[in-house]
Image (cartoon, helix red, strand yellow):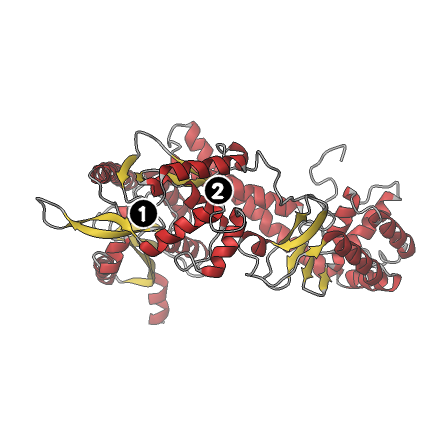
Amino acid sequence: MENQKESDVAIFVFLYARVSTERQAVKDLSIPDQLNRMRMYCESRNFVVLDEYVDEGRTATDDNRPAFQAMIDSVMNNDKKIHAIVVHSFSRAFRNVTDLALYLRSLSQAGTRLISVTQDVDDSPIGRFVTLFYGLVDEMNSAENSKHVKRALKENARRGFFNGSRPPYGYRTTETKVIGRTGYRKILALDDDEAAIVREIFDLYEGVGVPAPMGMRKIVEYMNAKCLCRGQLWRVQKIQKILSDPVYTGVFEFGARWKLHNRNTMPSGSYGVALDKDDDSVVSVPVPVIVDKDRFQRVEVRRAARAPRNTPPLHVAPRTLLTGLCHCGYCQSSMHIVTGKSGRYRYLKCSRRHTISGSICRSPNVPYERFEKMILKTVAEHVLSERKLKTILDDCCTHADRFAKHQGTERRQITDARAKVERKLTNLYRLVEDEKVRIDGSLGRRIQSWQDELKNLTVKLNSIRVPVTLSANIANSIDVGTFRAAAIALLEDSSSDDARAFMHLVVGEIRVYADEASVSGPNIGVLEAALAHMRATMPAVPSFMSNWRREGDSNP
């Protein structure tokens, strides 16, 4: 009885600790101290610590922290009620007052408090106000610290020093004595081995020392056969960055950022990545020269002439009968269509082998037209035979109850998840309209993630095609012979939208190997195709399909 009573009054808590830099985490400057203080705090109050979560080298200006997200998920889904999350100070959990307010609301709904060891605040309305005030001060301090750090880094760069991070390929960092000061600062120096590889990449692109100039994909294959790029495989984006980065002409631009861009919106000559510059924030730092400016400009002109907007790409992605169905049997990557002989021939090729190197996967190029005919023949003989069709339809009706149960459970789960996201967005929009919160970068990213999640859940909900109810004799009402004849006739025109829709119903995946291919698909897809055919020959509107007029429109 005493044990039962103790468990009834036990207060279960999680501990959360965080440091902003990896240097602090490595040197144990803060994490052990935070945890020790929190453990002592919990021990003095008889709190039961269920788990400890630590984020090392993570900022609190946003919630993109693995341990933090795992802790929140555990709070919301734990079998035991979590009464509180204990932190050393509120700044360890949040340095963004908007995130603090939103998470306090979510935790309050789950019956969980946020407790700071060093900032004693109760759960009253005044206590919540004081907590948000602490959050506002933490955000201001974070912004001020960031401003001073950036100013110091820019000044360090103006003096010719390197501000940490990973040096560009072809360079290494070395320490130099600072005159008039104690200590050392880093500068960029040549890495002789990597610098030689950079020059070789420029040689290959211009055709120096080789029979003909190489494109970027050929350079990737050549380099992967020769060496790795700092322990990783070479990729087209890395070759592009080396050919585009002005650092090799002797100027390192501190503050510039490389970003992925849409090819259609990129400046002439760009291919996949581009350098974003803001003249007010970029500082030019002199570094050793690897490639002279004249050669760099020649390569820039050559890249501009060979940019995708000026030359048709060799890789095309037409919408074909087998689009999205084919996967490499060796590395499980998707397979897409590439062309040969100026577009006269089409082949299925492993996407990993295409984007990285021809030697990374042993799958061959498969002639597409011949492969499509082979798949059509396989589907006609092994799926659309009358005997196989009867077996599939009988199996679907035999397990109709299981399908319906699974369908109902999945639909409820997706519906509940979508409703939860909609509530979050509605509450947030209301706060914005009432001018209680301001949309900043962090909040904007969160809104975008919720909108993307809502869109994905809606797509999943609309894609559920399993019939809700099936009558016991539904298979007997389907004319298998007529359906088979109609399906085979439909597949004769493989370029039609109806043929593609039918193929994606009855085929789930095609695994492609060197000398064979395996085709698999859901039985329920065949049943739905048969019901769709039966629907087309009946004047009445069927009521047993779960996705019938799911959008509610009058002209589907």
Q: Can residue 117 be seen in this view?
A: no
C-alpha distance separating marks 1 and 2: 19 Å
Label 2 Cα neighbours within 10 Å, binned few <14 / some 14-19 / many ≥20: few
Residue 451 vs residue 543: left or right? left
Residue 402 vs residue 100: left or right? right
User: Residue 328 location, x and y as percent?
Assistant: 63, 59
User: Residue 540 location, x and y as percent?
Assistant: 86, 41
- Mark with earlier residue (1, 2): 1
Asked whether 281 or 554 is in front, the reply is 281
What residue is shown at x 55% (from left), y 52% (from top)? 355
Residue 358 vs residue 90: left or right? right
Quadrant of res 392: bottom right
Quadrant of res 251: top left
Asked whether 525 or 366 is in front, the reply is 366
Q: Which residue lies furthest to the left in this view?
A: 180
What residue is shown at x 27% (from left), y 43% (from top)? 287
The type of residue carrying mark 2 is: Ser
> According to the image, label 1 marks what residue?
59
Classify mark 2: helix, strand or loop: helix
The type of residue carrying mark 1 is: Thr
Asked whether 135 or 303 is in front, the reply is 303
User: Residue 127 location, x and y as percent?
Assistant: 27, 42
Q: Is residue 54 above or below residue 119?
A: below
> According to the image, label 2 marks what residue?
449
Label 1 Cα neighbours within 10 Å, binned few <14 / some 14-19 / many ≥20: some
Please identify the quadrant where the C terminus is shown.
top right
Residue 163 vs residue 541: left or right? left
User: Residue 520 location, x and y as percent?
Assistant: 72, 61
Classify mark 1: helix, strand or loop: loop
Please identify the quadrant where the N terminus is shown.
bottom left
Q: In this view, does 310 lie above or below 234?
A: above
